[in-house]
Image (tube, rainbow, N blue to C red):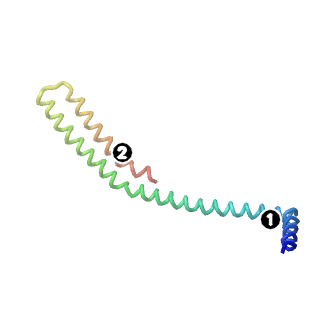
Amino acid sequence: MQQLKKKLQRAADRFMASKFAQKGVLALVCLTVSVGEAMAASKGAAGFTKATQEVSSYQTPVSNLMKAIAAVIVLVGAFNVYFKMQNGDQDVKKTIMLTIGGCIAFIALSEALPLFFK
């Protein structure tokens, strides 16, 4: 048994000393690493694809929410303008412009939101 073990050890040493064996082991290691990276990359790409689809699914509800916020801005701004006009304040024009500007900004952003996902 001991003799067989020594013969196998010598054969393995001779095999590993040859250039052909070294190149073969190197090629096997490179192949293993590249296959592992390809598998990891495909799983990562699938994860990014799923995340993109998930984020894109929120596009319509967020756009509708922004339009609803614009409607609230208009209502609050209209009451604010009405009360300022009743009290005789001097900055009614400023309040009107701020209300209209906020409303336009929210509507424009809600319409531009789909362009970010193309």
Residue 96 vs residue 46, the one in the foreground: 46
User: Who is closer to the viewer here, 113 or 14?
Assistant: 14
Q: Residues within 10 Å of mark 2 (few under 14, many from 20)?
A: some
- Find disc 1 in the rendering and name its residue: 24
Which residue is label 2 attached to? 109
**Mark 1: which secondary structure?**
helix
Kindly identify the amino acid type of the residue bearing the numbered disc 2: Leu
Above or below: residue 2 compared with residue 38:
below
Q: Is residue 85 above or below residue 52?
A: above
Q: Residue 56, image x and y in percent?
A: 41, 56
Q: Is residue 16 left or right of residue 103?
A: right
Figure check: 105 above or below 6: above
Question: Measured from the top left, where is residue 5 in percent x and y?
Answer: 84, 71
- Give the left or right position of residue 47, taking residue 74 as reference: right
Q: Secondary structure at mark 2?
A: helix
The label on residue 83 is: none
